[in-house]
Image: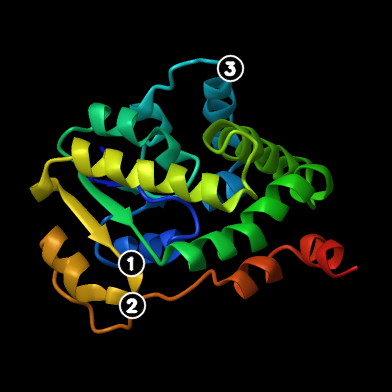
């Protein structure tokens, strides 16, 4: 199996909802950060990449038909080069809402979670995201709104410049099935489009995080 869909969107742009949607449409399994959380053996290549190793992308995504979310989308250009026939989905949302969500979820998750996660593996995953995204992508300035939004805008512009128009879908998950199914050539399911991983959902998955944020 090779990747048929590359998710180039940043975290907190509806990536978990998109994962579930892709799986319903037959483009699964879909690789998301939660795959790494649930399967400790998947962490190693991301740690190696932080040390400068070039991952074997075929091996990293062995058994997966699609990919969304960080840390994978941090390497979207490498994935586009490795899987040139794959369609690319760039998830988008209102910038102010996105930044607010980022500050309420990812920022505390990687800073607090790397020290207080509920298992050694959970702490290691949080630390990997902290190093890859908080420091690597956002240069340690993940609470600086203007800087973070510039990084995001630059990323969106880069995807638009790089991916051929017919191969790229800019997608707001609020659009639901129609746009996504037309892009992928898939029939529209009878089931509602997945809506999940709100800020409340995110914090409810991490009681240790909520406890420290409200104490």
* Residue under the point 33% across and 61% down: 23
SS for callout 3: loop
Percent coordinates x, y for residue 128 in the rendering: 63, 35
Mark closest to the chain's N terminus, 3 or 1? 1
Of badges 2 and 3, nearer the viewer stands 3
**Residue indicated by mark 3:** 51
Image quadrant where residue 13 sits: bottom left
Q: Is residue 52 above or below residue 197?
A: above
SS for callout 2: loop
Q: Is residue 160 above or below residue 210?
A: above
Left or right of 196: which side holds 116?
right
Q: Is residue 138 above or below residue 198?
A: above
Of badges 3 and 1, nearer the viewer stands 3
Q: Which quadrant of the figure contains the C terminus?
A: bottom right
* Residue under the point 81% across and 64% down: 213
* Residue 21, disc: 1
Percent coordinates x, y for residue 115 in the rendering: 82, 43
Percent coordinates x, y for residue 44 in the rendering: 58, 28
Q: How much space separates mark 2 and mark 1, taking CA atoms?
A: 7 Å
Percent coordinates x, y for residue 179 in the rendering: 18, 69
**Residue indicated by mark 2:** 193
* Residue 183, disc: none
Mark closest to the chain's N terminus, 2 or 1? 1
Contact, mark 2 vs mark 1 (Cβ under 8 Å): yes
One can see residue 169 in this view: yes
Q: Which quadrant of the figure contains the N terminus?
A: top left
Mark closest to the chain's N terminus, 2 or 3? 3
């Amino acid at each position: 199996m090779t990747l048929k869909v590359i998710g180039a969107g940043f975290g907190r742009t509806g990536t978990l909802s998109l994962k579930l949607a892709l799986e319903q449409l037959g483009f699964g399994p879909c690789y998301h950060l939660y795959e790494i959380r649930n399967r400790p053996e998947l962490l190693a290549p991301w740690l190696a990449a932080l040390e400068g190793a070039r991952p074997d992308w075929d091996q990293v995504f062995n058994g997966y038909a699609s990919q969304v979310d960080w840390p994978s989308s941090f390497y979207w250009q490498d994935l586009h080069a490795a899987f040139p026939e794959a369609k690319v989905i760039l998830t988008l949302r209102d910038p102010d809402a996105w930044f607010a969500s980022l500050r309420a979820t990812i920022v505390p998750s990687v800073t607090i979670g790397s020290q207080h996660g509920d298992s050694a593996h959970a702490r290691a995953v949080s630390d990997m995201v902290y190093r890859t995204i908080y420091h690597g992508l956002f240069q340690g300035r993940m609470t600086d709104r203007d800087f973070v939004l510039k990084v995001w805008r630059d990323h969106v512009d880069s995807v638009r410049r790089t991916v051929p128009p017919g191969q790229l879908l800019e997608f707001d998950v609020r659009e639901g099935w129609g746009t996504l199914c037309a892009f992928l050539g898939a029939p529209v399911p009878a089931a509602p489009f997945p809506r999940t991983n709100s800020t409340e959902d995110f914090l409810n998955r991490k009681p240790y995080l909520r406890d420290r944020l409200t104490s």
